[in-house]
Image (cartoon, rainbow, N blue to C red):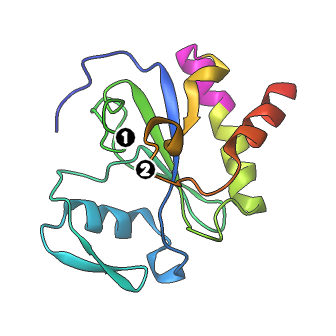
Amino acid sequence: MKLRTKEIIGIIVHCSASDRYAEDDIENVKELHTSIQKMSWNNKYAEGKGWDDVGYNFYINFNGDLQLGRELKYSAAHARGYNDSHIGICLSGLNNVANEAQIKTLSWLIPVLKKQYGMKWKDILPHNAVNRLKSCPNFDFYKLRESLKEE
């Protein structure tokens, strides 16, 4: 893994693209990201990425539990062009993403990271804002971000 060469200036929020509880854990995402073979994911087959580690820095499962992923000192692998400067947070889910427990955890985590790294609200984005081909994170992130600004 490559050490970050840029300072952390933002956050990108993702979803895992699976509503299956059997895949509701960062270790399963890590297996998909580090495998070099096709794997079953969300009842389909996905190509393994062959990476050194999971691409996200944080993962929030369906129960709202926060799981640690790739250490922040390493460049992430979650959004091309942003990996060295942005933290990747992934919520478990595809269509059932952003339940109350997940939003509660995300609503705590984002302000903590924002303050720690001196970010502005405009630097905290959904994945589809930096990759128009993605629907991820599959919920209205801007509505959530606005509600966090008011707190």
Q: Would residue 112 be found to the left or right of residue 14 on screen? A: right
Q: Are marks 1 and 2 in contact (CB under 8 Å)?
A: no
Q: Is residue 39 above or below residue 56?
A: below
- Quadrant of the frame with the N terminus: top left
Q: Is residue 149 above or below residue 47?
A: above
Q: Residue at x 20, y 67 (%)?
A: 48
Q: Residue 47, percent across and down?
A: 21, 69
Report the front residue among 143 and 63. 143
Q: Residue at x 63, y 16 (%)?
A: 120
Amino acid type, mark 1: Ala
Report the front residue among 109 and 6. 6
The part of the image, by quadrant, that contains residue 30 is bottom left
Residue 29 appears in the figure:
yes
Residue placed furthest toward the front? 133
Residue identified by numbered label 1: 79
Q: Would residue 30 be found to the left or right of residue 8 on screen? A: left
Question: Closer to the observer: label 1 or label 2?
Answer: 2
Q: Residue 67, percent across and down?
A: 49, 55
- Classify mark 1: helix, strand or loop: loop
| Membership of 115 in magenta stretch | yes
What is the crowding at mark 1: few (fewer than 14 residues within 10 Å), some, or many (at least 20)?
Answer: many
Span colored in magenta: 111-119
Residue identified by numbered label 2: 133
The part of the image, by quadrant, that contains residue 116 is top right
